[in-house]
Image (cartoon, helix red, strand yellow):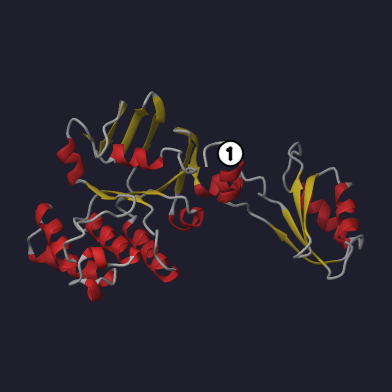
Amino acid sequence: MLKVEGLTKHYNHHAVVDDLSFHCDAGEVLGFLGPNGAGKSTTMKMITGFVSPSAGTASICGHDIVADGLAAKQRLGYLPEGAPCYSEMTTASFLSFIAEIRGLNSVKDSLRLDELIERLHLGPVLNQTIETLSKGFKRRVGLAQAILHDPDVLILDEPTDGLDPNQKHEVRELIRSMSAEKLIVISTHILEEVEAVCSRAIIIAQGKILADDSTEKLAQKSPYHNAVLINVVAGGNLEQVQADLGKLDSVEKTEVDLERSTITVLSNTESNDDMDAWRDVTDLVNAGAVSIEGLELKSGRLEDYFRHITQGTLA
């Protein structure tokens, strides 16, 4: 449904996006990630036809976004960064305008518009001009125009920016409900959002792809995958416990949090089994060598891996 081949964009001889290639299918929710300045928004603008590439191509459902742009955009919904809308229009007139230019004029289409207004809680601001809306309401109006025509491919650039926690939850639920038959691409810097709704993630930095895999597998590449979190008994000797743990061959390093009285134990990267540290720590505890209140095996987080591979890139 989306195919990107060698996509490149130069500004003043500087490659903002540098030879990106990937493809996505229906049923995927792709998180497109990177530090500030990585080229995320520029890539989204090229994929949707708002910026012409310096080289390479992108196609939506088989339609080249440059050579066959109108057909591609008919299959596409796009929420740009900042959710720009016609500020002098009311919410109702803007959405009616979008429906008209999308060719939506049946009773079924009207019912869909009513459903979206209700689902995105836009009823109270239908008669307000968009320039008077809060950032959160502007974002929801932008989302409504992007999905009004029920597109096959949905490109969302920071879809929950400016929303409160309840509104973020509602938008994420909306994305999940649409994801079975569509391709949804979410460009964001909120890694919690990617873990919550995305099945796959691409991480870019300096315009190049650094990683492309399922969110679960990327989280497992984190240095903290299968790390052991130890809650030391209140008043316990953290330094002594840390010293005892440091003697274990399976332990790469330990990190102490004095405020929380915890020690995080990272497995030795040369170990054949990344569960060795867990087994050795539990043996130490069972032998009564250290006094603790609890142990927890960490699964690793996408954020940990993101920070690990993007350190030293633009931020």
The one of 311 and 286 positioned closer to us in this rendering: 311
Where is residue 133 shown, x and y percent of the image?
28, 67
Q: How many marks?
A: 1
| Vertical comparison of 117 with 66: above or below | below
| Vertical comparison of 172 with 31: above or below | below
Asked whether, in this view, residue 111 is left or right of residue 206, the answer is left
Q: Residue at x 24, y 57 (%)?
A: 147
Q: Amino acid at mark 1?
A: Ile
Q: Residue furthest bottom?
A: 124
Figure quadrant of the N terminus: top left
What kind of element bears circle 1? helix
The image quarter in which residue 56 lies = top left
Where is residue 167 shown, x and y percent of the image?
38, 68
Where is residue 28 shown, x and y percent of the image?
38, 48
The one of 223 and 62 positioned closer to us in this rendering: 223
The image quarter in which residue 54 lies = top left
| Vertical comparison of 44 with 172: above or below | above
- Residue named by callout 1: 309
The one of 104 and 141 positioned closer to us in this rendering: 141
The one of 19 and 283 positioned closer to us in this rendering: 19
Q: Residue at x 25, y 40 (%)?
A: 50
Q: Residue at x 44, y 33 (%)?
A: 207
Q: Residues within 10 Å of mark 1 (few under 14, many from 20)?
A: some
Asked whether, in this view, residue 94 is left or right of residue 205, the answer is left
Asked whether, in this view, residue 277 is left or right of residue 109, the answer is right
The image quarter in which residue 169 lies = bottom left
